Amino acid sequence: MTSRECLDDVTSNGGTAFIVHPLGKRKITFNINLEAWNDWEHNGFTGIEIWSYLHDWIHDLKLSNLWHFYKYPNRQIKGPDPKLLSLWDRLGQKRKVVGISGLDAHLRRIPFVRKPIFTYKELFKTIRTHVLIDGELSKSDEAIQSIYKAHKEGMCYISFDLLADATGFMFVANSGDRMYHMGDEVFNIENEIGFCIKSPHPATIKLLRNGKIHREIKGTFLETSSTEKGVYRVEAYIENRPWVFTNPIYVR
């Protein structure tokens, strides 16, 4: 079965499909050779993985710096690949494409070294996908479905929570008497659309339109407006380190 056929099979059965490792990864020294996804005209996927911890960590890995990367793994995290963010912005101008994160969690043991690397306890504190849902979570089927829905609709944002807990980060828009959230598509706006961003921690906050900076501030609050259509999303940095990447609000 081809990858395209797999996607079609998932969606035809009511599933939600995401492309992980979309740019692939090739590190011959470490026996890593993952194929990139190239069939971007196919609409069978809901979204893509825009930030993978392990793929970020391994990006600049060499034999010469392996020990340093082992001792200080979180210092090597640079953020989503700019090429992938640019691709995401372009895809979003055609249709909604949800962005999620991943860890690619694989516990590793190094010969003659006692401490393993990438333990699940450590990794699960790093890059996370925060979902926006109504009410408290429980172990019910209804709660599980609400998480599925949040991922499918793009009602989520990604953060490097080891820097700071991004719980409560907010990105909304308003036009007329209506309010819009991450993942929403806005049609037939009135004269302008307003944007409001609130951060639980001081940060460099960037509102982007189609990948270009529309407004940037340092602090915890940004409020601005626009009369232009486009794919609007937010990036936030703490001391120049990548922290938050929201899903877009699409102004059509």
Image (tube, helix red, strand yellow):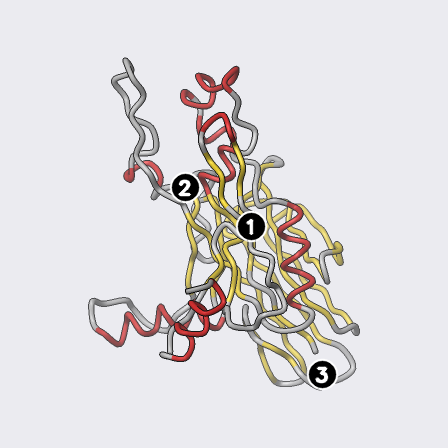
* Amino acid bearing label 3: Ile
Q: Residue at x 40, y 45 (%)?
A: 103
* Amino acid bearing label 2: Thr
How many angstroms separate mark 3 from mark 2 (CA)?
38 Å
> Are dots 1 and 2 in contact, CB under 8 Å?
no
Q: Residue 36 carries which label?
A: 1
Task: Report the residue marked by disc 2.
Answer: 126
Q: Which of marks 1 and 2 is in front?
A: 1
Q: Is residue 175 above or below residue 166?
A: below
Front residue of 92/222: it is 92
**Sooner in the amino-acid sequence: mark 3 or mark 2:** 2
Label 2 crowding class (10 Å Cα cut-off): few <14, some 14-19, many 20+?
A: some
Q: Which of marks 1 and 3 is in front?
A: 1
Q: Which residue is drawn at 34% across and 33% down?
A: 118
138 with respect to 169 (left or right): left
Task: Report the residue marked by disc 3.
Answer: 189
42 with respect to 155 (left or right): right
* Amino acid bearing label 1: Ala
**Sooner in the amino-acid sequence: mark 1 or mark 3:** 1
